[in-house]
Amino acid sequence: MATRAVSSPVASPTVLITGASGMLGRALHRLLLLESNYYNIIGLGFSRLEVNHYHQHFPPPSTTKHDCHKSKVCLHRINLLDYDETSSFLRQHNPDIIVHCAAERYPDAFEKNLDASFQLNVDATRNLASECLRLASENREHARKRPYLIYISTSYVFDGGVSSHVYPPYKPGSKTNPINSYGKSKWEGECAVRDILNKVEGLGQGFIVRVPLLYGADCVDLNESPALEMMKVHLPQNQCDSNETRTIKKIDDWALRFPTSVEDVAKVLKQMIDRLLEESDDNAFRAGTYHVASPHGCTKYNLLHLQSNLLGISSDVVEKRAVGDSSGPPATSAPRPQCTQLDCSDTWRAIGQDFKFVTLEEGMEKALCGFPERFM
């Protein structure tokens, strides 16, 4: 039976997560629930309101019977494009921190539904930033700048140097030049957060966190992550998409990606949340832009070989089912930069410590545990 996370006492800081049914939103929601005696966690969704935080291939960290270890958790349904509904909900719960994960994050899907995607990625973000400023202005008498807004953005705000001639690794202040609509929408979302919360009348409430290609250890659908979808070549033929047959697939061997575990990103976000809640005068974690990305890079085709090897699938089998394509992104897909590696040194300096990401081998072993049955 699904259970809703129970609110903690009034004194507990409230963290609200939009897009809590998505990969990153789930990971952060799950992580904070493990400390639900301290945080009051509110997860928002829209089309998917019940999430499975654990399953047989991704069990809870202990057998302790506690709400945070329930396999299913219910989310609050909020349409972020209904500004009156959003405003009313925020006023009711008065969160200390909002982590804005909700977005259309698939570049190809974005291109097929431009208006709705821009509304979600830009307009909803602008409205959330405005609501944060309004709530903080009302809280000024209590000397509070809350709620803070942590906006999840993307490495696709950079072009890989193709036009800007600014090459990776990119620092937060590097010149941006998104080359696809998804990247442009996230850049416009960033601008809205900066302009409303960190400039002119802003109170320094806006935090932008750019991330690269993500994957999760709890996924049960390979399509949920571009870092896992290549493994569909190893599914039984009748489990492939209905319009697909067992033909040799072309897998990108051109773009250098930096697949990053959402569980790792969630841990860094939690460190950021904890720093924000300190509110000490010497807190080095200030409003601005931060990068969070694994340093381990590879092409999707190389990643397919690594994943296959972990599962005991030989290179010979891989090469009968897939071939590397080093000619560039397919002409039928949204344009993509070749490399947008992120420099995270400013992030580690701001939160006061470096972070050790899982290796690709470690991360993929967890993400693919139970393959193929788990994904069928």
Image: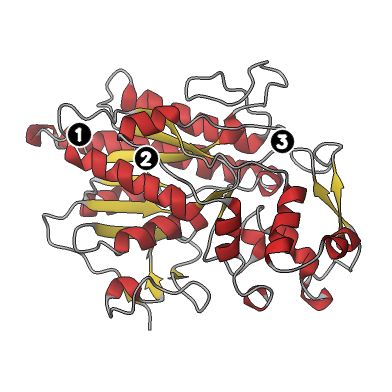
Secondary element under disc 3, as helix, strand or loop, is: loop
- Residue 60, percent across and down? 39, 73
Q: How is the image coloured?
A: secondary structure
Amino acid at dot 1: Lys
Query: Depth check: 209 or 316 in front?
Result: 316
- Residue 30, percent across and down? 38, 63
Secondary element under disc 2, as helix, strand or loop, is: strand
Mark 2 residue crowding within 10 angstroms, few (<14) / some (14–19) / many (20+): many
Q: Are marks 2 and 3 in contact (CB under 8 Å)?
A: no
The answer to whether any part of residue 257 appears in the image is yes
Measured Cα–Cα span from mark 3 to mark 1: 38 Å
What is the residue that sits farthest to the left in this orientation? 141
| Residue drawn at the location 37% of the way across and 40% of the way down | 150
Q: Is residue 49 left or right of residue 225?
A: left
Measured Cα–Cα span from mark 2 to mark 3: 25 Å
Which residue bears the numbered disc 2?
Answer: 150
N-terminal label among 3 and 1: 1
Which residue bears the numbered disc 3?
Answer: 336
Secondary element under disc 1, as helix, strand or loop, is: loop
Measured Cα–Cα span from mark 2 to mark 1: 14 Å
Q: What is the quadrant of residue 137 in the picture?
A: top left
| Residue drawn at the location 66% of the way across and 16% of the way down | 164
Quadrant of the rendering where the C terminus is positioned:
bottom right
Relative to 214, residue 354 above or below: above
Which residue bears the numbered disc 1?
Answer: 145
Query: Depth check: 121 or 245 in front?
Result: 245
Query: Depth check: 15 or 326 in front?
Result: 326
Q: What is the quadrant of residue 75 in the picture?
A: bottom left
Relative to 304, residue 238 above or below: below
Q: Nearer the viewer, mark 3 or mark 1?
A: 3
